[in-house]
Amino acid sequence: MKKISMPVEAAASSQISPVNQAFLTIQSATKYTDLSVKTLRRAIANRELKAHTVCRRLLLKVSDIDAWVTRDTMGN
């Protein structure tokens, strides 16, 4: 049986779906922003940061996180 090799870039891209790139769990968002879970949960509770619940998992959209951090650092 002949084994077919796949280029590294193609193998890596086939494992990462667009959903995984667009959303982060709250734990991943803490690493992404270098903020605490408490800070992110407070922003969600105050409706400053939008969150989505999927299968009992809290997901944050990367673009929403970026906008919130930018808005917060600009003083608005």
Image: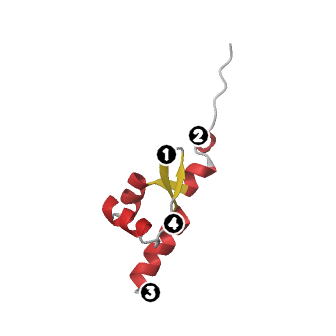
Image coords of residue 33 (percent x, y): 39, 64
Residue under pointer 2 = 15
User: In terms of image quadrants, where is residue 72?
Assistant: bottom left
| Horizontal arrangement in the rendering, residue 72 relative to residue 51 (left or right) | left
* Number of marks present in the image shown: 4
| Horizontal arrangement in the rendering, residue 1 relative to residue 52 (left or right) | right
Mark 3 vs mark 4: which is more N-terminal?
4
- For the residues labelled 1 and 4, say whether their Cβ atoms are less than 8 Å apart: no
Q: Secondary structure at mark 3?
A: loop
Q: Amino acid at mark 4?
A: Lys
Q: Amino acid at mark 2?
A: Gln
The 10 Å Cα crowd at callout 4, few under 14, some 14 to 19, many 20 or more, is some
Work out which residue is located at the far top of the displayed protein and give it.
1
Residue under pointer 1 = 56
Q: Amino acid at mark 1?
A: Arg
Residue under pointer 3 = 76
**Quadrant of the image for the N terminus?**
top right
